Amino acid sequence: MDFEDILLGFVGQNIVLLLLAALIIISVLMGVRIVPQSMKFVVERFGRLRSVLGPGINFIVPFLDKVAHRISILERQLPTHSQDAITADNVLVQVDTSVFYRITEPEKTVYRIRDVDAAISTTVTGIVRAQIGKMELDEVQSNRADLILRIKEQVEDAVDDWGIEVTRAEILDVNLDQATRDAMLQQLNAERERRAAVTRAEGEKRAVELNADAELYAAEQAAKARRVSSDAEAYATSVVAAAIQANGLEAAQYQVALKQVEALTALGEGQGKQTVVLPSAALDAFGDAFKLLKGSK
């Protein structure tokens, strides 16, 4: 065996080793799959679903298995979609909707639906029209939260077979045509005027009630005052009557004389009275009162 044969044999062995090493490296590279946290890989073997790889390091059979689909599991937002709908009271509205979703089971999404966004958009359109058709315009405006909740629940049921989770459904706006807006504005102005008239009427009614209450209170207080005065006079009369009954005629004469003295005293205290002319009867009254007062002591 000459040198050339030895050299060729050595080179042939190295080539085989190199090819074997390259095969091992390629097999390792093909058999190891590192999946990002936000992704899932769908693995097929001979065109059939083999497995779904989650985030992290995964191993597959080289040359037999292949990653057929790389699916993002991040939350997605459908583009804002405008659609027409007719309410239960025959008002045409234009509804702007938006849906947020994420893929939870990629094997269902890949093999059961072709265009996920278009399918969800079509589903939302039908559900929104059906729900708004059951409600009047005022209910659509005032119960938007309930409407959104019902739409979300029905969309979730519809897309469950596609391995999709609907996270949020939003009604961004409900637009009306100009004629409907004008009619609603007139109705709103009429309602405001009605409320203002009711408020004024209630205010006037309340003022009349308060005035009547005030007059009634004043009458009650005056009656109480008259009752107190009458009670006082009755008490004084009873005291005088008791004194007369106890002391006889002298007590009565004493009271009469005392009243005469009080009257003359008041007359003398009047303004502009420099001289007081007293009749002889008045002097006799002073004397009688003095005598009676002295006798009572």
Image (cartoon, helix red, strand yellow):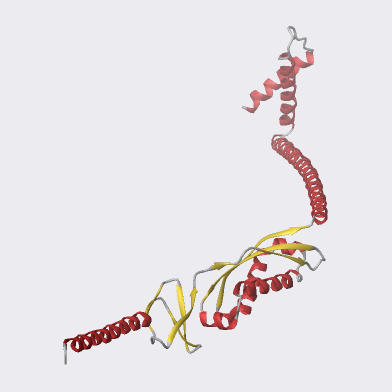
Residue drawn at (68%, 24%) of the image: 292
Q: Image check: 237 left or right of 100? A: right
Q: Quadrant of residue 204?
A: top right
Which residue in the rendered view is the most extreme toward the bottom?
Answer: 1
Residue 57 image offset from top left, x and y in percent:
36, 78
Residue 18 in view of the camera: yes
Instruction: Residue 58: tell me if it is visible.
Output: no
Decide if residue 286 is on the left or right side of residue 158.
right
Residue at 79% across, 57% down: 177
The correct choice, above or below, for 261 with respect to 142 in the image is above
Please, is residue 268 above or below residue 10 in the view? above
Q: Position of residue 213 (x, y in %)?
A: 76, 44
Residue 67 position within the rendered picture, expressed as x and y whole percent measured from the top left: 45, 81
Which residue occupies the foreground of this view, 74 or 213? Answer: 74
Which of the image's four quarters has the C terminus?
top right
Residue at the spot 58% in from the left edge and 80% down from the top edge: 162
The image quarter in which residue 139 lies: bottom right
**Residue 138 versus residue 179: which sits nearer the camera?**
179
Residue that sits furthest to the top in the current view: 274
The quadrant the N terminus occupies is bottom left
**At which x and y percent is residue 116?**
60, 75
- Judge from the rendering whether residue 33 lies leftward or rightward of residue 7; answer left or right: right
Q: Is residue 15 above or below residue 71?
A: below
User: Which quadrant of the view contains residue 154?
Assistant: bottom right
Q: For this rendering, which residue is in front, 277 or 82?
A: 82
Query: Looking at the image, which residue is at 16% across and 86% down?
Result: 3
The residue nearer to you, when weighing 17 against 276, is 17
Q: How many marks?
A: 0
Above or below, comparing residue 220 to residue 279 in the picture:
below
